[in-house]
Image (tube, grey):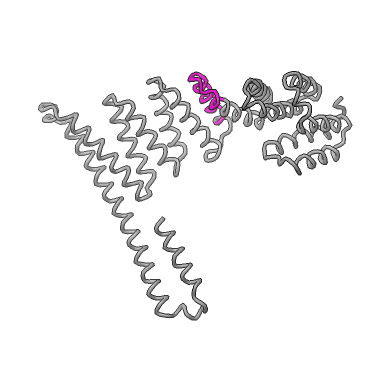
Amino acid sequence: MLKVFCQYWLFITLLRRKFWCELESPFYRSNLFLYECLIENYQITMAGHEQKAMELMADADKKLNSSKGFFGALFGSGSSKVEEAIECYQRAANLFKMAKKWGQAGSAFCEAASLHSKAGSKHDAATNFVDAANCYKKVDPNEATSCLLKAIEIYTDMGRFTMAAKHHQSIAEMYETEAVDLERAVHHYEQAADYFKGEESNSAANKCQLKVAQYAAQLENYDKAIQIYEQVAKASLESSLLKYGAKEYFFRAALCHLCVDVLNAQHAMERYVDLCPAFQDSREYKLLKVLIEHMEEQNADGFTEAVKDYDSISRLDQWYTTILLRIKRQVNENPDLR
């Protein structure tokens, strides 16, 4: 952060000079010297943090070895040495963080977590595993996932299912973005939703379920996506605050139906109107009707224009675009959609 600030400060200073020839002026040279000094001090500070952290790691190892020795057992000082080692590992981890040595910071937090776990301090162990995961996220998503799974195991054993659900959600988010694996993301979102439901956190559970439906549809598991969208839509209708969002979930479910079979989509739309009469007056319902007409007529151009007209008013995100392209593909591939 300091390095970025220094670069920005120098850049702004240079812009204020009227002529490039002034770059050779004493003003420029003095400011450049100051900038280089600041960068050098920053690098020295980072190296100092790393060196101190390494010393603390070595100190922690010494304390652990002494706690296992004859005198440690004789005088009962083993437990205090372990506590001191844990403190050294935690301090080292924080210094590694300051030096931006994320992998080493994660490793140090893992050492502290393992010692807490052996000592029976479950909550502290889980906390340190989560700290380790937050460090590993920056350099190694797989190690971050491993640490979070260890924390989840501890939290479920303690009956802390809301915490376990949140960490399953974090793992799913990593599989969404960093270590892209949609099937694993779906698995962890499902697990998070189950735990949230068990703790009566229905709103959080629905958010995870909707993620499952989103990726299930992308993976062409349309039946699962339809089931979830219909379930969440029906639940939304029971709430005066959430009922206006039901039409979006019915719309998504109907599009998933269209990926499989037009007739099933038409029957589903009739059910949705019975459940939510307002759905029939929505732009989403009208678009679905037009799309079905173009599909039956095998009018690919008309299909495209209908989607463009809708998108000009209500922007379609990447998920909608993907699903609609799959549906459109059927217009040319299937000789008869009636």
Q: Quadrant of the N terminus?
A: bottom left
Q: Position of residue 113 (x, y in %)?
A: 32, 32
Q: Which residues are magenta?
A: 185-205
**What residue is drawn where x is 77% and y is 39%?**
310
What is the quadrant of the C terminus in the image?
top right
Residue 224 seen anywhere in this rendered image of the structure: no
* Rendering quarter of residue 300: top right
Residue 312 on the magenta span: no
The quarter of the displayed image where residue 139 is located: top left
Expressed as whole percent of the image width and height from the top left, the position of residue 41 reads 32, 61
Relative image position of residue 83 (x, y in whole percent): 22, 33
Above-or-below relation of 37 to 208: below
Residue 159 shows in this picture: yes
Identity of the residue drawn at 40% across and 29% down: 151
Q: Note whether 37 is above or below 223 in the view shown.
A: below
Residue beneath the point at 49% across and 73% down: 16
Q: Main secondary structure of the magenta part?
A: helix
Residue closest to the far front? 240
> Which residue is pictured at 36% across the width and 29% down the height?
126
Q: Residue furthest right?
A: 297
Q: Give the image location of residue 65, x and y in percent.
A: 19, 35
71 or 130, nearer to the observer: 130
Q: Quadrant of residue 322?
A: top right
Using residue 3 as the reference point, say whether residue 220 is left or right of it: right
Q: Nearer the viewer, residue 250 or 110?
A: 250
Q: Name above or below for residue 311 compared with residue 149.
A: below
Q: Is residue 203 magenta?
A: yes
How many numbered marks are there?
A: 0
